[in-house]
Amino acid sequence: MMRPQPSDTPPSPDPWDPAQYARFAAERAQPAYDLAALVERPPAAAPVARIVDLGCGAGELTAWLHRELGATSTLGIDRSPSMLERANALHAAGVRFAREEIGAFVAAGPPAGGPFDLVFSNAALQWVPAHEALFPQLWALVASDGQLAVQLPVNDQHPSQSIARQLATEAPFAEALRGYAGFTPPYAPEWYAGVLRELGAARWVVRVHVYGHELRDTAAVVEWMRGTLLTAFAERLATGAFAAFTAEYARRLQQALGEQRPYFLTYNRLLLWAHK
C-alpha cells in the first residue's frame, strides 16, 4: 500500500464536486422524487407555503420541490460553497440558499419567520450525528399541520460502505483521520417509527426502498462513491493520502465485488414522512 508523503498538500476545505455528484444525477434524484410523493397536498393537508431543504446540494431538486408544491418561499441549506455556487446560479424565483451546517441550523430552532410547513431532507442527515437529539429539533421546525420528510441511505452493509469504514481504522490512515470512519449509519427503521410516535405525529410513514442502479462496471462504484461517501475522507486526508486511500479502497472493492459488466448496484434508502 502506498503511504502518504509528508509533502502532501492539505485536505480540501470543500471536497464536494457538483460535476462529480451529477454524474449519477438521475439515479440520485429518484429517491427524492419518491420522498416528495409522500408529502400530502391540499385538501388532505394545509398548503405547503414555506419549505426548508436541509442539505440542498446544487439546488436543482430544491427548485423542483418549490415548483412542484407551489410554495411561496423555499430555503435551501448546505455547507458546501461549490454546491451553493451552482445552486445560486439557478435564479429560481421564491427560492434562496444559505451556507449553514445542518446541525447548527436545526439546533437554533425556528427562524424569525417561524416554523416551516415542510421540513425536507434528501440524503443529508446521515452526516449529522446523534439522531436521538436531532429529530426532536427537526420536529420543532415543523409548523402545526406541517410535514417532515426525510430520506436516509441505509446501505451500510454493502461492501462499498463497509470497506471504507474498515480501511479508515487501519494504518496509515487511522492516525490522520483521528477516529473518523465515515458517517454513522442511521438507526433501524423501527427506531424512527418509535421516535415519530413519541413526538406525537398525527400520521407517519417509515419504509425502506431498495433501489437498483445499473452501472457500467464494478469500477464505476468508486466513481459513485467519489461524489458522496469518499468526500468526507477527502476533507480529512491530505491529497496524496486520499489518493492512496482511494486506490486501496478501489482494490478491495474490486476484490469483493469481482469483475462485472454491467454491475447492478443495490442501494437501500429509508423514506420517512410525518404530519404534525
Image (spheres, rainbow, N blue to C red):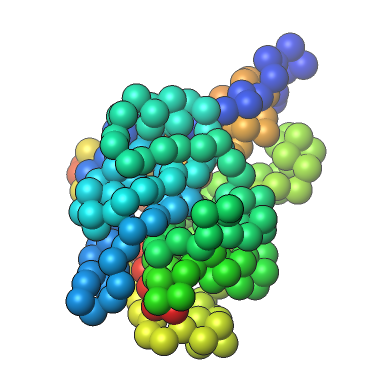
- The vertical placement of 2 against 261, above or below, is above
- The vertical placement of 175 against 152, above or below, is above
Left or right of 112 on screen, residue 267: left
The N terminus lies in quadrant? top right
Left or right of 68 on screen, residue 140: right
Residue 84 falls in which quadrant of the image? top left
Residue 130, percent across and down?
A: 67, 65
Residue 244, percent across and down?
A: 59, 27
The C terminus lies in quadrant? bottom left
Q: Residue at x 22, y 48 (%)?
A: 67
Viewer-side residue, 207 vs 169: 207
Left or right of 263 on screen, residue 83: right
Residue 41 falls in which quadrant of the image? bottom left
Q: What is the total number of numbered labels drawn onto the structure image?
A: 0
Residue 185 falls in which quadrant of the image? bottom right
Left or right of 98 on screen, residue 263: left
Residue 149, percent across and down?
A: 39, 66
Q: Residue at x 65, y 72 (%)?
A: 132
Viewer-side residue, 107 vs 242: 107
